[in-house]
Amino acid sequence: MTTNSSDTLARLAAVIESRKVANGGDPEKSYVARLLHKGPDAFLKKIGEEATETVMAAKDVDHGGDASKLVYEVADLWFHSMIALSHYGLTPADVVNELARREGLSGLEEKALRKAQAREATGE
């Protein structure tokens, strides 16, 4: 991710944060404020919808559809995921840091590590 990408995500996260009712966001005037005001069920439902639309757009690309539609849907998915992150006191930087932590690990190694950590946590 380039600095520009990180900057864009940070700016968007700041806007989302500013839309919280506690920070002066008005649910009557702001889509983000409305979703946050309605609570997790509202924005989590949107994440599910956007994830489904992302899968459908990818399937369309497999059959000759416009790849820009996939980008559009992923942007919606990321946006709504960022609303969830904000609600839970997290930022895109937290996600980027997690991705950086995983960098260089194979997916299989990372999955095995998570399983081992889960076993340790439960005392198995």
Image (cartoon, grey):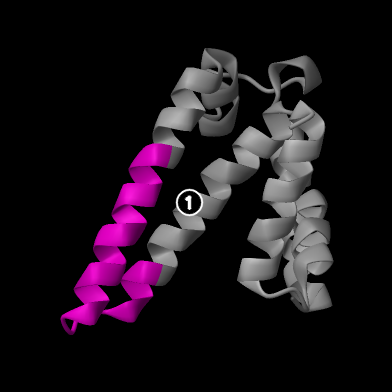
* Rendering quarter of residue 112: bottom right
Query: In percent of the image, x 55 and y 53: which residue is there?
Result: 78
Left or right, 80 with respect to 65, comes to right
Query: In percent of the image, x 77 and y 15: which residue is there?
Result: 22
For the stretch drawn in magenta, what is the main secondary structure?
helix
Rendering coords of residue 45 (x, y %): 40, 30
* Rendering quarter of residue 58: bottom left
Q: Which residue is mark 1?
A: 77
Verify whether residue 118 appears in magenta. no
Query: In percent of the image, x 46 and y 52: which residue is there?
Result: 76
Left or right, 94 with respect to 31, comes to right
SS for tag 1?
helix
Rendering coords of residue 31 (x, y %): 51, 31
Could one spot residue 101 in this view of the protein?
yes
Rendering coords of residue 75 (x, y %): 50, 59
Q: What's the amino acid at mark 1?
A: Leu
Q: Quadrant of the C terminus?
A: top right
Count all numbered tags in the image, as a single digit.
1
Verify whether residue 61 appears in magenta. yes
Could one spot residue 89 in this view of the protein?
no
Other residues around mark 1 within 10 Å, as few (<14) / some (14–19) / many (≥20): many
Up-down relation of residue 3 to residue 19 (above or below) = below
The residue segment tinted magenta is: 48-70
Up-down relation of residue 103 to residue 88 (above or below) = below
Q: Which of the two residues, 30 or 59, is positioned nearer the viewer here?
A: 59
Up-down relation of residue 100 to residue 14 (above or below) = below
